[in-house]
Image (spheres, helix red, strand yellow):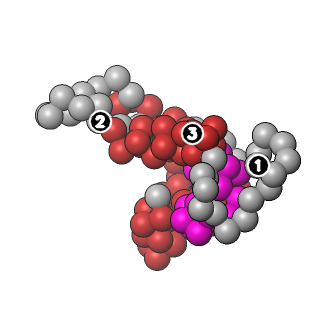
Amino acid sequence: MLFHGIHKMINGFQGIKDLLSANNLPEILWIGVPIGEILAPLCILIGVFTRISALLVAITMFFSIYLAHAAEVFQLGQSGAPVIELNLLYLLGALALFFIGAGRYALYKREVGFLA
């Protein structure tokens, strides 16, 4: 996710804004891209607010599948894998991190509540 976000940061977010407009969504939602593709993955990598960051990545991936790959959800590629295989990998990995948590090694751990 981080590399996708960096690519968009370098080349601009106009493609995201166009996708949002084409799907009758407010253009201001483009702000979620740097949060979900740069900030959240960095937080996951350093082990800070892992569950919240994983949820942000999962939401970003739901939007990615809906906006850019809706027509490809049930299609298979040449190797027999789903066309949206990478998107599913990020989505399911983020959901796993959200439900399981960061594990033993994290910089910040909350000991109280579900989002610990």
- Return the x and y of residue 89 as percentages of the image width and height: 40, 42
Extent of the magenta region: 39-59
Which comes before the other along the chain, label 2 or label 1?
2
Residue 78 visible, this angle: yes
Q: Residue at x 63, y 47 (%)?
A: 101
Residue 56 visible, this angle: no
Which comes before the other along the chain, label 3 or label 2?
2
Residue linked to disc 2: 83
Please, what is the dominant secondary structure of the magenta stretch? helix
Q: Residue at x 48, y 64 (%)?
A: 2
Mark 3 belongs to which amino acid?
A: Leu
Residue linked to disc 3: 95
- Return the x and y of residue 24 as percentages of the image width and height: 63, 39
Tell me the quarter of the picture where residue 75 sits.
top left
Tell me the quarter of the picture where residue 37 sits.
bottom right
Instruction: Select label 3 or label 1 by which is in front.
Output: 1
Helix, strand or loop at label 3? It is helix
Mark 1 belongs to which amino acid?
A: Ala
Helix, strand or loop at label 1? It is loop
Q: Residue furthest bottom?
A: 10
Compared across the picture, whether 58 is left or right of 52 comes to: left
